[in-house]
C-alpha cells in the first residue's frame, strides 16, 4: 500500500516537473516567479470482505487521460511553423496510440477544454502512449473504480455503487461507513530562477472509508449456489434459493438466489407446511392443545360450518395424535389445533404470537431494501383465515423471515435476529420455553427419520426438519399446477450448528412436494458441509509458486493481477492441476487446468 501511494505521489511530482519545464521554455516570464500545483486525489471506499478476509468489493485507483486542448492551442498560436508541424505530428501519433477516432483537424476545433483519451489501470499505460515531449499537454486524473464479485449470487447481497454512493444491499446499508472520508492533497512548487528545483510543499493523504467484514463464507456461498442452480435446472423450476444460518448466533454464512435480485430479503413466498412447527409450538405453550391430542383424518375438513370451503390433505391419514400429525404433516389435524388455539387465545392471540416470530416485520438484517412481508392484521382476517394461516396459506413471508422464525425451535426457544456482519452484536429474545422447543425439535427429528422429510436423511448424521409445499397464488386464486417446494432443517439435530432453508419456485419436471424436491437438496448441502474443512490461509511469497488447487477462476485472476504471477489458464471451474508444483522457486510461468465442480 505504501509503495502504491509513493508511486502515485512520484507520478504527480514528475508530471509537475515536466509541465513546469515546458511552460518555462515556451512562456518565459519574470524572475523568481514560482509555479505551484495543488493536486488532489480521492479517498477509496472501504473494502467489503467475507468472514475469512477474502475481498468481495474493493476500490482501485484508475488513471484517466485527457488532452488539454486549451494549453495545446495556446502553444500552437505562439509557435513557429516548424514547431507547429512537429506538434501536429505528435498529435497524430497521440491520436493513433489512444485509438481516438476524431480527425486531427476536428480535435483542434473541439470546443471543450479537454478531450477524453481513455481509462487505464496504471499511469505507465498512459505515459507509454504519449509521444516524447507531448506529456505536458496530457492531463492525468486519478479516480477510483469499484470492483466487486458478481458470481454465486454475491452481487444480490453486496449491492452496487453509482456515482460514489451505495445502491442496494450492504453497499447502501453501510454507505456512510464505507464511503471515503477526506480527499488527499499534494502541493508542489517550482522555483524558476536562478535554479529550477521542484519543492514538495505538503502531502495530506486521503482518509479512506472503513472496511466491512461479512459473516458470509465465500466457499459455502459457492457450494450453496451450485447446489440450488443444479436443482433449478433439474426440475425446470422458475427459480430457487437457500440460506445457511448459524443456529445460535443468527449469522448468515451463505444466502443465494438464482434471481438477479435479492429474493431472500425482498421476495415473498407462502411458507406452506413449514410454518406448522410454530403453530404446534404455540399450541403447547398456550396449553390450547397437549400431546394427548387425537384426531381422525378423513383427508379433508370444513373449518367453518356455514362456509362451503374445505381444506384437504394429500391423503387420509386416519387416526393421528399430536406428534404423528406433525410428522406426517396432516392438514386436517393442524386445522383442528388452530381451532383450539382460536378458542383459547382468539384470532388476536394467534396474530400476536406469530408476530413474535417476526412475521409482518423486517428482521433488521443489514441489507437495504428488506421488506416486511404480507401478514394482515387480525382485524382484517376473514372467518377462515385462522385455518389457512395455520397451514401456511394467506401469509407471505420473506425467506430470511422464515428461517429466523423456525430457527427459534432449533435454538431452544430463543429467536435470534439474522445478520450478515461477522462481528455484529447478537440480538435475541426468548419466545418459547426450552421444554416446548425441545419437544417440537424431537418431533422434527422424526419428520426426517420416518415422515415427510425422509429424503433429507444423511447416513450417520442426526437431522431435524420440516417440509413445506405451498400452492402459488395467481390473481387472487391458488394455482393447482404451481408450487413452492420448501425444506427447512438443522444439524446436528441434538445440538444444531446450522439451520438451512431450501426453496424451489415452481418445479415443472413432475415432482413438486417439498419432501420430494427440496429435502434432497438439504441432504446434499449437509453432505457438502461435512466435507468442507477449514482451509488454511493462502500464503504467497515472491518467487515461490503458491498452492492454487481448489481455487476458482476468480481467485486465480485476482492472484495474477495483484501478485504479479504469469499464469496461463485452461478451462473453467476450479483448479484441478497446476504446474509447477506448489513451493517451486522462481517460476517464469504457472499453468493451471480448471474443471467444473
Image (cartoon, grey):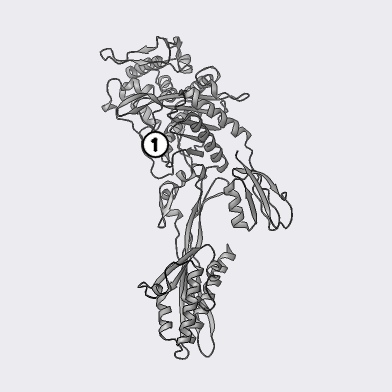
Residue depicted at x 39% and y 39%: 266
Residue depicted at x 40% and y 73%: 107
Q: Is residue 461 left or right of residue 385?
A: right
Nearer to the camera, 468 or 423: 468
Pinpoint residue 363: horizontal percent, then vertical percent. Answer: 41, 38
Pinpoint residue 506: horizontal percent, then vertical percent. Answer: 42, 29
Q: Is residue 192 left or right of residue 168?
A: right
Picture mark count: 1
Q: Quadrant of residue 470?
A: top left
Nearer to the camera, 573 or 34: 573
Residue depicted at x 55% and y 19%: 449
Vertical order, 129 against 465 (above or below): below
Q: In this view, does 518 lie to the left or right of 113?
A: right
Residue depicted at x 41% and y 41%: 364
Q: What element carries label 1?
A: loop
Q: In which quarter of the image is the N terminus?
A: bottom right
Vertical order, 45 against 481 (above or below): below
Q: To which residue does mark 1 refer?
A: 267
Q: In which quarter of the image is the C terminus?
A: top right
Residue 345 visible in the picture: no
Nearer to the camera, 47 or 292: 47
Pinpoint residue 407: horizontal percent, then vertical percent. Answer: 48, 30
Amino acid at each position: 500500500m505504501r509503495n502504491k501511494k509513493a508511486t502515485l505521489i512520484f507520478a504527480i511530482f514528475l508530471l509537475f516537473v515536466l509541465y513546469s519545464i515546458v511552460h518555462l521554455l515556451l512562456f518565459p516570464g519574470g524572475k523568481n516567479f514560482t509555479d505551484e500545483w495543488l493536486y488532489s486525489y480521492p479517498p477509496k471506499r472501504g473494502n467489503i470482505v467475507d468472514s475469512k478476509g477474502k475481498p468481495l468489493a474493493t476500490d482501485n485507483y484508475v488513471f484517466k487521460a485527457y488532452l488539454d486542448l486549451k494549453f495545446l492551442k495556446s502553444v500552437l498560436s505562439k509557435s513557429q511553423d516548424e514547431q507547429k508541424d512537429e506538434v501536429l505530428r505528435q498529435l497524430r501519433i497521440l491520436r493513433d496510440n489512444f485509438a481516438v477516432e476524431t480527425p486531427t483537424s476536428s480535435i483542434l476545433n473541439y470546443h471543450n477544454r479537454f478531450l477524453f483519451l481513455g481509462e487505464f489501470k496504471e499511469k505507465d499505460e498512459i505515459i507509454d502512449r504519449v509521444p516524447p515531449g507531448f506529456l505536458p499537454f496530457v492531463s492525468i486524473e486519478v479516480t477510483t473504480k469499484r470492483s466487486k464479485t458478481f458470481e454465486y449470487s454475491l452481487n444480490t447481497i453486496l449491492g452496487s455503487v453509482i456515482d460514489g454512493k451505495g445502491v442496494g444491499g450492504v453497499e447502501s446499508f453501510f454507505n456512510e461507513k464505507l464511503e471515503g472520508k477526506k480527499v488527499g492533497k499534494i502541493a508542489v512548487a517550482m522555483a524558476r530562477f536562478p535554479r529550477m528545483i521542484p519543492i514538495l510543499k505538503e502531502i495530506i493523504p486521503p482518509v479512506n472509508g472503513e472496511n466491512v467484514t461479512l459473516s458470509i463464507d465465500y466457499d459455502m456461498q459457492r457450494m450453496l449456489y451450485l447446489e440450488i442452480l443444479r436443482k433449478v435446472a433439474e426440475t425446470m423450476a422458475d427459480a430457487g434459493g437457500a440460506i445457511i444460518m448459524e443456529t445460535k448466533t443468527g449469522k448468515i454464512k451463505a444466502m443465494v438466489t438464482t434471481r438477479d435480485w435479492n429474493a431472500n430479503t425482498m421476495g415473498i413466498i407462502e411458507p406452506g407446511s413449514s410454518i406448522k412447527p410454530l403453530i404446534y409450538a404455540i399450541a403447547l405453550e398456550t396449553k390450547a392443545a397437549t400431546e394427548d391430542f387425537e384426531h381422525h383424518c378423513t383427508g379433508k375438513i370444513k373449518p367453518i360450518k356455514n362456509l362451503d370451503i374445505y381444506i384437504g390433505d394429500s391423503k387420509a391419514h386416519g387416526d393421528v395424535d399430536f406428534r404423528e400429525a406433525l410428522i406426517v404433516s396432516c392438514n386436517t389435524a393442524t386445522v383442528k389445533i388452530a381451532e383450539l388455539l382460536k378458542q383459547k387465545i382468539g384470532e388476536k392471540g394467534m396474530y400476536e404470537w406469530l408476530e413474535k416470530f417476526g412475521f409482518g416485520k423486517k428482521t433488521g438484517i443489514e441489507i437495504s431494501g428488506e421488506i416486511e412481508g404480507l401478514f394482515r392484521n387480525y382485524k382484517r382476517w376473514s372467518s377462515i383465515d385462522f385455518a389457512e394461516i395455520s397451514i401456511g396459506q394467506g401469509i407471505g413471508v420473506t425467506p430470511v423471515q422464515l428461517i429466523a422464525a423456525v430457527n427459534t425451535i432449533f435454538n431452544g426457544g430463543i429467536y435470534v435476529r439474522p445478520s450478515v456482519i461477522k462481528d455484529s452484536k447478537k440480538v435475541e429474545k426468548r419466545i418459547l420455553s426450552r421444554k416446548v422447543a425441545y419437544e417440537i425439535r424431537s418431533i422434527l427429528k422424526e419428520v426426517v427419520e420416518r415422515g415427510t422429510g425422509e429424503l433429507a436423511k444423511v447416513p450417520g448424521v442426526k437431522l431435524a426438519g420440516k417440509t413445506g409445499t405451498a400452492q402459488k397464488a395467481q390473481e387472487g386464486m391458488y394455482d393447482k399446477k404451481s408450487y413452492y417446494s420448501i425444506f427447512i432443517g438443522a444439524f446436528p439435530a441434538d445440538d444444531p450448528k446450522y439451520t438451512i432453508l431450501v426453496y424451489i419456485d415452481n418445479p415443472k419436471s413432475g415432482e413438486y412436494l417439498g419432501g420430494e424436491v427440496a429435502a434432497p437438496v438439504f441432504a446434499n448441502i449437509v453432505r457438502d458441509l461435512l466435507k468442507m474443512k477449514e482451509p488454511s490461509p493462502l500464503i504467497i511469497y515472491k518467487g515461490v509458486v503458491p498452492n492454487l488447487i481448489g481455487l476458482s477462476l476468480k481467485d486465480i485472476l485476482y492472484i495474477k493481477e495483484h501478485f504479479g504471477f504469469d499464469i496461463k489458464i485452461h478451462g473453467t471451474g476450479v483448479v484441478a492441476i497446476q504446474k509447477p508444483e506448489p513451493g517451486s522457486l522462481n517460476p517464469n510461468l504457472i499453468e493451471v487446468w480448471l474443471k467444473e465442480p
